[in-house]
Image (tube, rainbow, N blue to C red):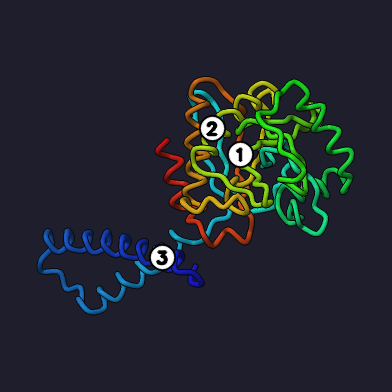
Amino acid sequence: MFGTRLGLSTTGRACAVQFGLLSGAAQLYLTFWPDSSLPRGPAFLALAGVALVGGVLRSWPRQTVRHEYLRPGFRVTLTVGDLFDQPCHLVIGFNDVFDTDTTDDRVIVRRSVQGQFLHRIYAGNVGRLDQDLASALAGRQPVALESREAKPLGKLARYPSGTVAVLGLPARYYFLSAYGTMGNDLTVSSGPDQVWQGLGELWQAVHAHARREAVAMPVIGSDLARIDSMDHAGLIKMILLSFVTRSRQSVVCKELTIVVRPEEYGRIDMLELGAFLRTL
């Protein structure tokens, strides 16, 4: 709470609001009982103390916020943790060529969600993952084919932005969403338009396969996709707005969980995002 500028500003605002409410109540009391013998100095200190305690409690860091929508019925949860610990279907961000190789971190960085997917779900077996990807993309036509001279490493077939490859079994599907473009220099880039389009395709795939069961996803675009025009909170709000808007048409899944990595936690205001959820 006090270790970051965001935490300090949140606590300060909460304390100021609490003090304003309490002082307003005190003024109302004095209006009706002007002859009160209440000592003003100690009363002010008491108000300030109560406001401080109330502000701290109001802005105490939360690692989970959720909101339930009644019509139609679905729930959204925002939590801090490990995506792969979630016992449900998972969304994994990919690039438009569906690269998988993490050797020396040259093509795919091992610490990324995409790299963790290979090593934690496929035990590092690139061949098996590539085979499953080929099967999932069999009905999709690439929009471009790079030459090996232009792209020395990685895959060459480019798929449309927003393409979703569905892997796994009905008990646990993995929705691999291609929201970023892998450059021939092995640098991934993306933007708000690509993310928004990718989210629309993602909800369609989830609606078709997940049988309305719970789905968890990371904050896509927050790490190596280099979306410099939006911060973490902005990306989360985009995901929430897209999901709730689509769910108003028909339920995509009964619960969507957005998982924030612990190292990203200090960059967002859970209270603000909780309030944003309630406005949708």
State which mark lies toward you, 1 or 3: 1
Label 3 packing within 10 angstroms: few (<14), some (14-19), many (20+): many
Q: Is residue 41 left or right of residue 71?
A: left
Q: Quadrant of residue 146?
A: top right
Q: Are marks 1 and 3 in contact (CB under 8 Å)?
A: no
Q: Is residue 279 above or below residue 247?
A: below
Q: Are marks 1 and 2 in contact (CB under 8 Å)?
A: yes
Residue at 48% x, 24% y is: 248
- In space, the residues marked 1 and 2 are separated at their CA atoms by 8 Å
- Mark 1 / mark 2, whichever is N-terminal: 1
**Looking at the image, which residue sits at the far bottom?**
41
Q: Quadrant of residue 149?
A: top right
Q: Name the residue beneath numbered marker 3.
A: 11
Q: Name the residue beneath numbered marker 1.
A: 179
Residue at 45% x, 60% y is: 59
Q: Quadrant of residue 77?
A: top right
Task: Answer yes or no: is residue 87 visible.
Answer: no
- Regarding mark 2 in the picture, which secondary structure is present there? helix
Residue at 43% x, 59% y is: 58
Q: Name the residue beneath numbered marker 2.
A: 197
Q: Is residue 12 left or right of residue 1?
A: left
- Mark 1 / mark 3, whichever is N-terminal: 3
Three-letter code, disc 1:
Tyr
Horizontal and vertical percent for residue 87?
74, 40
Residue at 73% x, 34% y is: 157
- In space, the residues marked 1 and 3 are separated at their CA atoms by 36 Å
- In space, the residues marked 3 and 2 are separated at their CA atoms by 36 Å
Three-letter code, disc 3:
Thr
Task: Answer yes or no: is residue 251 visible.
Answer: yes
